[in-house]
Image (cartoon, rainbow, N blue to C red):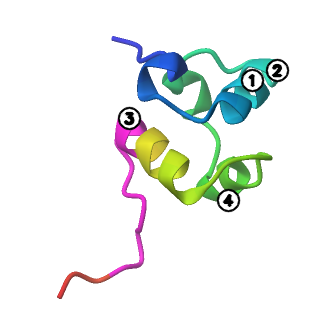
Amino acid sequence: MSTKLEDLKLKPWLLVELNQLGYDVVEDMQHLPTAELLRIPGMGGQDWRKIAKALGRDPFPGLKKR
């Protein structure tokens, strides 16, 4: 099942930017590394965490749990 970016309740300007880049569903961004996703204008921490959760990625891969 593909998750639409509109369903993640991202910031409107980020949603417009992602649509301009050709991303309509979360699975379209599966091939991009984390660094490239964070370089998208308007992509912030909270939005990145939502997208990472939808992609099944760990948003903080180097962080140790205490």
Q: Secondary structure at mark 1?
A: helix
Which residue in the structure is indicated by mark 2? 20
Choose mark 2 or mark 1, whichever is in front: 1
Which quadrant does the C terminus fall into?
A: bottom left
Q: Secondary structure at mark 3?
A: helix
Amino acid type of disc 1? Val
Which residue in the structure is indicated by mark 4? 35
- Residue located at (47% from left, 28% from top): 9
Query: Is disc 2 in contact with disc 1, using a CB cutoff of under 8 Å?
Result: yes
Q: Which mark is residue 40?
A: none
- Residue located at (69% from left, 35% from top): 14
Q: Is residue 61 left or right of residue 23?
A: left
The CA distance from mark 4 to mark 3 is 17 Å
Amino acid type of disc 2? Gln
Amino acid type of disc 3? Ala
Q: Which mark is residue 16?
A: 1
Q: Nearer the viewer, residue 49 or 26?
A: 49
Which residue in the structure is indicated by mark 3? 54
Amino acid type of disc 4? Ala
Q: Position of residue 8 (x, y in %)?
A: 44, 28
Q: Is residue 58 magenta?
A: yes
Choose mark 1 or mark 4, whichever is in front: 1
Q: Secondary structure at mark 4?
A: helix
The mark that comes first in sequence, 1 or 4, is 1
Q: Position of residue 7 (x, y in %)?
A: 43, 19
Q: How many marks?
A: 4
Position above or below: 39 against 24 = below
